[in-house]
Image (cartoon, rainbow, N blue to C red):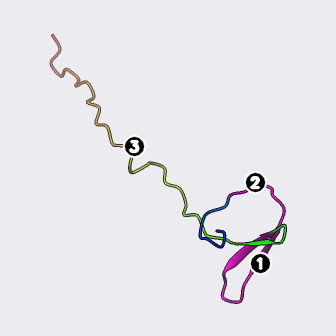
Amino acid sequence: MDRNGSPVYYRKGTSGMVVKAFNKDLFFCIDEIVYALEEIPSHEHKSRNFDHDINVEKPRKNIYLQ
């Protein structure tokens, strides 16, 4: 997060320095600019908004053979 509270993203492998404050907050310093790090919650296997449960009816077996 930058000083305005907007998220800032860098590519994987961007070099910089991570600073851990005494109060356990994490900061990332790159090119003399300091950003506050915010934990990203773990992802869900299904999206609540887009992946709805679809009930597909299975064909029933005919128990009476002719």
Q: Amino acid at mark 2?
A: Lys
Q: Residue at x 80, y 56 (%)?
A: 13
**Numbered circle sitting on residue 63:** none
Mark 2 and mark 3 lie on one chain; the one further toward the N terminus is 2
Helix, strand or loop for disc 2: loop
Circle 2: is it few (<14), some (14-19), or many (20+) Cα within 10 Å?
A: few
**Numbered circle sitting on residue 12:** 2
The CA distance from mark 2 to mark 3 is: 28 Å
Q: Amino acid at mark 1?
A: Val
Q: Residue at x 26, y 30 (%)?
A: 57
- Is residue 17 left or right of 21 when viewed as pictured? right
Residues in magenta?
A: 9-29
Q: Which residue is mark 3?
A: 51
- Is residue 13 left or right of 60 when viewed as pictured? right
Helix, strand or loop for disc 3: loop
Q: Amino acid at mark 3?
A: Asp
Mark 2 and mark 1 lie on one chain; the one further toward the N terminus is 2
